[in-house]
Every structure is written in C-alpha cells, then in structure tokens.
Image (cartoon, helix red, strand yellow):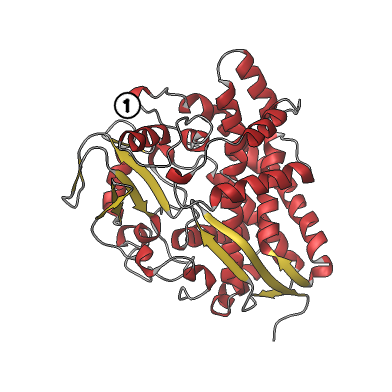
Amino acid sequence: MKATHPMARMRTDEDYERGPPLMSTAGGHPVCKVRSAADAKYLLSLDDGGGVTQNAWVLAHMLREAGVPGIPPRHQDVHEIYQFAWGQGRCPVMGQPARHDLMIRYVTRYFGKAAVDLARPAIGELARKLLDDQIPGGSGILDVAAFARRLAFRATAVLAGFPCDPVIEGTFERMFDDFTLRPSVALLPEGDPAERAFLDGILRSGAGGLIADLIEAEAAGELSHVECLAMIRGAWYAGTDTTGATTATVLALFGDPAGRRWQEEVRSLAGAALRKRLRACALEAGRLWPTFPEIPMVTYQEVTLPSGYAIPAGTHILLEVSAINRDEPVAGNCCPEDFRPDLRRHRSLAFGGGLHACAGEYLALAVVEEGIRELVARTSWFSLPEDGWLSQSGLVTYIDRAFIDCVASSPA
C-alpha cells in the first residue's frame, strides 16, 4: 500500500528523506538533524552518560545559556513531562537528580503488561460504550478523533484509578491541545497557574490507585510535589493523544481504498490472531507516521557519529523519526514507504528508544488493539471520506478531525 492517504500530507517531503546529518541554526543555537538509523541508534546508546542526553532540564539550561529567546526561567512546571518522559534512565550531567528509576516503578505497577492484560476486558467495555454513543447499530459516521482520544484517556484513568468525569476529561483535552500544537520545546509557556491548581485538585481528590500511592510517596519524602504532579500529567499527556493518534491512523489506513486488503484481513481473523495482526498494524503505522516526529537531544561533549560526522558540545540534536524509520536498518530493503504490516521490520523509533523509550508502550498497543477490535466486531465495513481527515504536527502528531463512514452491510 503506497503512502497516499491523508497522513502522508501532514509533513513536508524533506521530513521523510534519509541521508547524512543536517546542521542549521535556531535562535542562534546550533541544531543537528540526524536522519540515519545507524547514527540515531548510536546517539541513543550514549543517552545520559555518553556525551548526549534527552533530559529536557539540561536542554532548557543549555538553550538559556546560549541566549535562545523564549526559554522560561523556571523549568519545573514547563518541562515536567519531558523530565519524566516515561523514561528509565539516570542523568549524571549538570547535577540533574536521578529520579527516573524511582518513578518508573509506578509506571510498571499500573501500566505494565500484567496490569494491562487484566484490564483488557475493561478497555473493551469502554470502547463499546463509546461506540454505542457514536454509531448505535453499527452504522453512521464515527468521529475517530474523539473515539480514539477518549478511549485512551479513559483506559489510562481505569488502570491508574484516576478520577474521570466529563469536566476532568474536557479540561485535560483543552490543556493538551495547547501543549501539543506548539512546534518545539523552546516555545512552551511557563507553567499555567490554572493548570497547576487543576492538577493539585486531582492529587487531593482522594482517589485510589496511583493517586493514593503518590500521596503516600510525597508524605514519606520519596517524591516531591512537583514530581507527583508530573506523574499525573505524564500519565494522561503522554498516553492520550499519542495512543489516540495511532488508533486513528490505523483506522484511516484501513478506510483508505488502497488499504482495503488490510481491513478485509482483520475482519477474517479472531482472538489472538486478530490482536497480533492489529499490533503489527499499529507498529507499522507508527513507523510510517510516528506520533513523535522528532526526538530532541543535546550534546554536553563532542560526539562523533558512525557516519564520521562530529557534533560539537552544546548542540541541540533532533532525531528525525519519520526519516530514520524509513532507513534500511529499520525498514529493510523492501517497500520502506509502504504500509506493509505483513513484513518483518526491525524495531522503529515509534515509541522512542534508549533509556527514555516509552514505558507505556504495552498499554498504548493494547488500547489500539481493543478499540479497533470492538469497532470491527460492530461493523461490516468502514471507509474514509474524502474530507474526513485533518491532522497537524507540532510536538506530537495531533488529530484534530477524523471521520470514517461505517456501514452495517457488506461492501459491494
């Protein structure tokens, strides 16, 4: 299947081009765009200790020191999600506290494989209720963006024991919209007092699960108040639109006329075989159109790439994920531009890599699998209207509007 559907129009052609590193300047600060899989793999292997880091506090500090405008004086509100970043690494440079290992325990407890597998029936029930509201009887226009985002949001709430009602859900959606449409970390505003008060309210809500654990950890001095808020924000911000966007992308691929064979195939499968194929589809969609189109890093000493290119200390690095995922070491030597979930690809950067790889990957894939499985079970076919898709790309892939036309009879 050639990449002709609407997702391919989201970014310019140069975002997908493999090749040697490209140096440019942003705000007077050197920026290196890395576009090959070998160079990216090497940089990720050095993360947090080998001359380069993904840690946003270090990045913000170095950008401020370089005189880049727009960097807030305080990082603890602005960069919490990046500081946490669902990562497992330690950052020994520039005095950054090593807290990732402590925080990852909570992620594993609530969003690891064991917890997610137990929650699959609940995730399926959430999907059924959402579909009951939008396409009762299996026919009609499904608002894919709303379905995918809300399923991911509510699944996270169920697993973590978060309070979740229309007011909380709507507030988080508005906050995330403001966050995700900004084009770079450097343009994030200083922490919004209203957002901080909202997160404080959730932490004081008395809910169980992760909220109760965070209250206990703060009282015991294991986590600071800022870190507790980062856990709440990270759980929802890092999982809601990212997982929702992947779900919507797969559905757009199935609904595109060129993707008819893949929708036909998943409709012929059931049980574990269906989930396995849906997982392959989600990973392939993430390879072609990753939720995070760039992974920011920064060098704190000179680094020489396998390609021979030397990156000076203090350089802002952008791993161009869309290009790297099309490089032969990831895509193989067959159909790098095509959606081919039947091919065996090497691991892409759809969920990041290195010490800061996404720790919620299993949950994200489970939400995609259960949501699409329920939709397939409810409908006989769905298609993608000509004007049914609108997406933008800022810090993450943002699905603003997406519709599929569902029918309850077999296609002609």
Specify the amino acid type for callout 1: Val
**Residue 300 vs residue 75, the one in the foreground:** 75
Left or right: where does residue 311 sit relative to residue 326?
left
**Residue 48 vs residue 59, the one in the foreground:** 59
Counting from the top left corner in percent of width and height, residue 167 is at 77, 43
Counting from the top left corner in percent of width and height, residue 228 is at 60, 26
Left or right: where does residue 93 sit relative to residue 402?
left
Asked if residue 59 shows in the view, the reply is yes
Q: Secondary structure at mark 1?
A: helix
Callout 1: 10 Å neighbours few (<14), some, many (20+)? some
Vertical comparison of 283 with 175: above or below = below
Vertical comparison of 308 with 212: above or below = below
Q: How many discs appear?
A: 1
Which residue occupies 61% across, 55% down? 244
- Determine the image quadrant of residue 208: top right
Counting from the top left corner in percent of width and height, residue 313 is at 23, 37
Counting from the top left corner in percent of width and height, residue 26 is at 33, 50
Left or right: where does residue 398 sit relative to residue 50?
right
- Which quarter of the rendered picture does the C terminus lie within? bottom right
Q: Return the residue at label 1.
A: 93
Which residue occupies 59% across, 60% down? 399
Asked if residue 246 shows in the view, the reply is no
Which residue occupies 32% across, 33% down? 65
Vertical comparison of 178 with 261: above or below = above
- Determine the image quadrant of residue 275: bottom right
